[in-house]
Image (cartoon, rainbow, N blue to C red):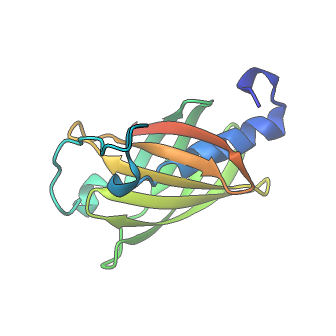
Amino acid sequence: MTFGLMRRAGVVAAVSAAVLAFTVSTADASTPGGREVARPSVSAVVPASSFDGKWIMDQSNAPHVSLFLGAPASDGSFTGFASWEGNSGDIDGRLTGGDVVFFIHWSFGHTGRYDGHLGSDGKWSGVTVDINDPSSQATWIARRG
């Protein structure tokens, strides 16, 4: 399904998929040849002050998604809220070192899984998949909003 041909619901599903991509772990990132992708080193633990707050996520298949994330608990779990063109969703996820996995449960019924990693530039990036339509996948990058 291409972005240009998607109806509003399809676009929302694509955005959902991209948001899910926020949770790609380092172990999952590899090149087509199976070699591990080199990543810049990041401190072993991401301080809560560098994680919670507002983020703007750009996805390869959709416009900006606003994320409002709470500080992680001692076990790394966190919650939050997402907003995109009048749609909203609840976020739950887990932060482990410089990796994150989270889900956005969109008000229109789709859920996105996001796998990502913190880069040395302070931005999070990764891949997302729409749980309701696994063929809908995208890459994403999030910066402070």
Q: Does residue 18 lie above or below 107 as drawn?
A: above
Quadrant containing the N terminus is top right
- Residue 22, position as x, y percentages in the image: 47, 49
Figure label count: 0
Tell me which residue sits at (43%, 52%) in the image. Answer: 24
Residue visible at 34% across and 56% down? 27
Q: Work out whether residue 49 or residue 3 is closer to the camera in this orientation and state it.
A: 3
Question: 112 or 36, which is in the foreground?
Answer: 36
Q: Position of residue 56 (x, y in %)?
A: 46, 38
What residue is shown at x 62% (from left), y 31% (from top)?
A: 62
Q: Quadrant of the C terminus?
A: top left
Of residues 105 and 134, the one drawn nearer to the viewer in this rendering: 134
Residue 144 in sight from this viewpoint: no
On the image, the x and y values in percent for residue 122 come to 26, 41
Residue visible at 43% across and 68% down in the picture:
78
Q: Is residue 66 shown above or below 73?
A: above
Expressed as whole percent of the image width and height from the top left, the position of residue 59 reads 54, 34
- Can residue 49 be seen from the camera position used here? yes
Looking at the image, residue 131 lies above or below residue 83? below
Extreme-bottom residue of the structure:
75
Please tell me in which quadrant of the rendered image residue 34 appears: top left
Could you say which quadrant of the image residue 74 lies in? bottom left
Examine the image and state in which quarter residue 14 appears: top right
Location of residue 109 with respect to 41 vertically, above or below: below
Is residue 103 left or right of 123 when viewed as pictured? right
Residue sitting at the far front:
33
